[in-house]
């Protein structure tokens, strides 16, 4: 994993070529209940294309929220917003009317509290493991990890409540939260000069304002430092993101010329995801060259969630992909595909190379990622 990237590149089989995210187990039961309802409705409305498509989009967003790194309150708000399925003009289908049981709302009893704590502890253990990759010599984090491992979160309610009250006031928890804050600071670091105040001097409120400001600064830097602009409207591209690209993905190392180059592609994808505050519910980003000749769809295909890998530490790993498009004079775009070069795979690869190289060279500048000699040479093998 790149130093302080916040994302983990998985190298060893069978997970090679995937990017790992910490699963948010504290909302797992709520998401599972909603997914069960959505899938029941998908069967009931499978003949109605409008409702079926809207339900499928909600299913994917629910799966993505399981991996969100946003605050719990924000995730809960998004889950609430996903309970209505829009279809047709001013029409909505309310999932709440079909729910068999509710997994939301405040903890109702002692049993729910203990279950909630158990999931919270497991999630924190996963986060601690990730932090210790970046801070392996941090004795306080190591002590906090050991104390959490010794905690019995599935015990009797009063004992668990007493333990959690103690943890809530512990210096280890404060230190843990400070280290999580460091990840945020690392993300803001490239924009330090434009923020007007040292990051380590900012209050929590100022950091939130800095995040909003960086959203605009990032767009400006993208346009001034590279040959790319970012497409805001992703609607026209959603259909192209349903299926993973056949060769330009984390699973297929042959296209990249070998495992090492493929893994470099994964590290670059991780950098892009981190730098552009990638939202897994949206699943992908779209960039376009300034001359309007090419566009690039980057992220996770809809079917990537069906192939998600469960790995150690309560994480899920997803394979990223990259698709390239040509633009015509009428502003229409066309994906570069194998069928455009019937029976000539070499010509297809050369076309992909021509289209992809401008993106890789531009975006690597934006995310301060130096392309290796190997990844550059891997394209030359098709010339």
Image (cartoon, rainbow, N blue to C red):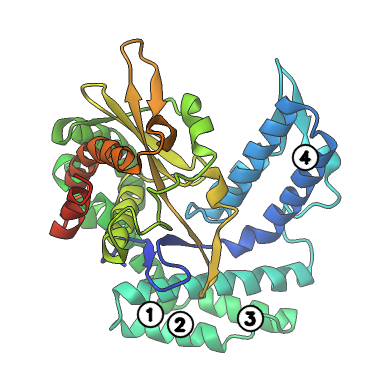
Percent of width and height locating residue 118: 64, 74
| Secondary structure under the numbered disc 2 in the rendered image | helix
Question: Relative to 236, is 107 above or below?
Answer: below
Q: Is residue 321 visible?
A: yes
Q: Residue at horizontal 22%, vertical 35%?
A: 222
Q: Residue at x 40, y 49 (%)?
A: 247
Give SS at disc 1. Answer: helix
Q: Which residue is mark 2?
A: 145
Q: Which residue is mark 4?
A: 42
Residue corresponding to mark 3: 162
Query: Label 4, label 2: how many angstroms apart (C-alpha)?
Result: 42 Å
Cβ–Cβ below 8 Å for labels 1 and 2? yes
Tell me where residue 105 appears, x and y as whole percent: 72, 52
Query: Which mark is nearer the camera, 3 or 4?
Result: 4
Q: Position of residue 263 (x, y in %)?
A: 31, 62
Which badge, 3 or 2, comes first in the chain's sequence?
2
**At x 40% / y 56%, what residue is drawn?**
250
Q: Residues within 10 Å of mark 2 (few under 14, many from 20)?
A: many
Mark 4 vs mark 1, CA separation in Å: 45 Å
Residue 143 placement: quadrant: bottom left
């Amino acid at each position: 994993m790149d130093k302080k990237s916040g994302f983990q590149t998985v190298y060893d089989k069978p997970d090679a070529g995937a990017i790992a995210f910490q699963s948010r187990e504290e909302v797992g039961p709520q998401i599972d209940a909603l997914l069960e309802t959505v899938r029941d409705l998908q069967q009931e409305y499978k003949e109605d294309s409008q409702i079926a498509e809207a339900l499928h989009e909600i299913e994917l967003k629910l799966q993505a929220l399981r991996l969100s790194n946003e605050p719990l309150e924000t995730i809960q708000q998004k889950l609430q917003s996903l309970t209505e399925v829009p279809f047709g003009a001013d029409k909505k289908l309310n999932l709440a009317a079909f729910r068999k049981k509710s997994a939301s709302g405040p903890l109702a009893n002692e049993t729910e509290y203990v279950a909630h704590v158990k999931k919270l502890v497991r999630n924190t253990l996963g986060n601690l493991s990730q932090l210790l990759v970046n801070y392996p010599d941090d004795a306080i984090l190591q002590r906090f990890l050991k104390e959490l491992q010794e905690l019995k979160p599935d015990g009797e309610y009063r004992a668990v409540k007493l333990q959690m009250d103690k943890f809530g006031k512990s210096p280890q928890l404060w230190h843990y939260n400070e280290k999580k804050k460091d990840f945020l600071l690392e993300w803001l670091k490239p924009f330090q000069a434009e923020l007007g105040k040292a990051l380590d001097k900012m209050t929590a409120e100022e950091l939130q304002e800095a995040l909003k400001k960086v959203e605009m600064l990032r767009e400006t830097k993208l346009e001034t430092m590279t040959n790319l602009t970012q497409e805001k409207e992703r609607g026209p591209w959603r259909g192209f993101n349903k299926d993973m690209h056949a060769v330009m993905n984390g699973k297929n190392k042959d296209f990249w010329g070998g495992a090492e180059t493929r893994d470099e592609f994964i590290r670059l994808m991780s950098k892009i995801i981190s730098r552009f505050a990638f939202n897994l519910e949206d699943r992908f980003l779209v960039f376009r060259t300034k001359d309007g000749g090419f566009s690039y769809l980057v992220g996770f295909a809809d079917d990537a969630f069906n192939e998600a890998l469960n790995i150690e530490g309560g994480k899920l790993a997803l394979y990223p992909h990259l698709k390239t498009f040509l633009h015509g004079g009428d502003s229409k775009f066309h994906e570069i595909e194998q069928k455009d070069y019937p029976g000539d795979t070499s010509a297809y690869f050369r076309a992909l190379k021509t289209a992809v190289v401008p993106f890789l060279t531009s975006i690597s500048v934006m995310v301060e990622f130096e392309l290796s000699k190997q990844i550059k040479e891997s394209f030359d093998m098709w010339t």
